[in-house]
Amino acid sequence: MTTLTFINLFLITVIGISALTDIRTGKIYNSITYPAIGIGILMSALVPAVGLGQSLLGIGIALIFFGGMWAAGGLGAGDVKLMVAIGAVKGSTFLLASSVNIVVIGCLMGVGVLAWKGRLWPALAWVGKMLVWMVSPWRKRPVLVTEQTTIPFGPASCLGALVTLLNDVFHFIWI
């Protein structure tokens, strides 16, 4: 087994466990993400395929982008730590590619659930107001006036990262 295969299997294990716990309990546990971040940094320092610089840059990008989504109320802290772990294990290039897949899959899941529950239009209006608030934070933060619907983001992270891994291995046209 090559080192890169081991890294990919490690990532699949981490995101798979995180997706399952997020579905079952609504949580992505620190006992999974913190060791994955540490092991990712250690592996990247020892394995030139990823590199320590790529790993640290992946961590930084995940903290800024997904941390911003957490600050806006769109993600849980466990989701952010999972993305940091993905950045630590596979580096910034992989994180950026999988982020596109993850956000697209997460949005499709969210739209599907909202449409199923009949809450799509109020939620879309709230998203628009949140986007305005994000560029003008001195305004009062908008409140969702209908019952809030949440979905676990871990499965979207898992599927998005898996799509990116498959693309790396089989060279699909998708991102």
Image (cartoon, rainbow, N blue to C red):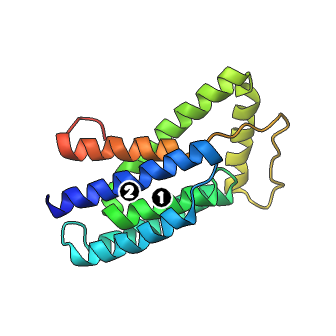
Residue at 42% from the left image edge and 41% from the top image edge:
159
Residue at 62% from the left image edge and 60% from the top image edge:
77
Kindly state the secondary structure of the residue where label 2 is placed.
Answer: helix
- Left or right of residue 157, residue 4 in this image: left
x and y percent of residue 28 in the render? 57, 56
34 vs 69, nearest the viewer: 34
Q: Which mark is residue 83?
A: 1
* Mark nearer the viewer, 2 or 1: 1
Residue at 18% from the left image edge and 39% from the top image edge:
170
Q: Reading the chain from its start, which is encountered first: label 2 or label 1?
A: 1
Would residue 98 be visible to someone looking at this image?
Answer: yes
x and y percent of residue 21 in the render? 56, 49
Q: Which mark is residue 168?
A: none
Q: Amino acid at mark 2?
A: Leu
Identify residue for label 2: 95
Kindly state the secondary structure of the residue where label 1 is placed.
Answer: helix
Q: Amino acid at mark 1?
A: Met
x and y percent of residue 39 in the render? 36, 72
- The answer to whether residue 146 is above or below residue 84 is above
Viewport quadrant of the C terminus: top left
- Left or right of residue 20, residue 41 in this image: left
Residue at 19% from the left image edge and 45% from the top image edge:
169
- Left or right of residue 139, residue 152 in this image: left
Label 2 to label 1, Cα distance in Å? 8 Å
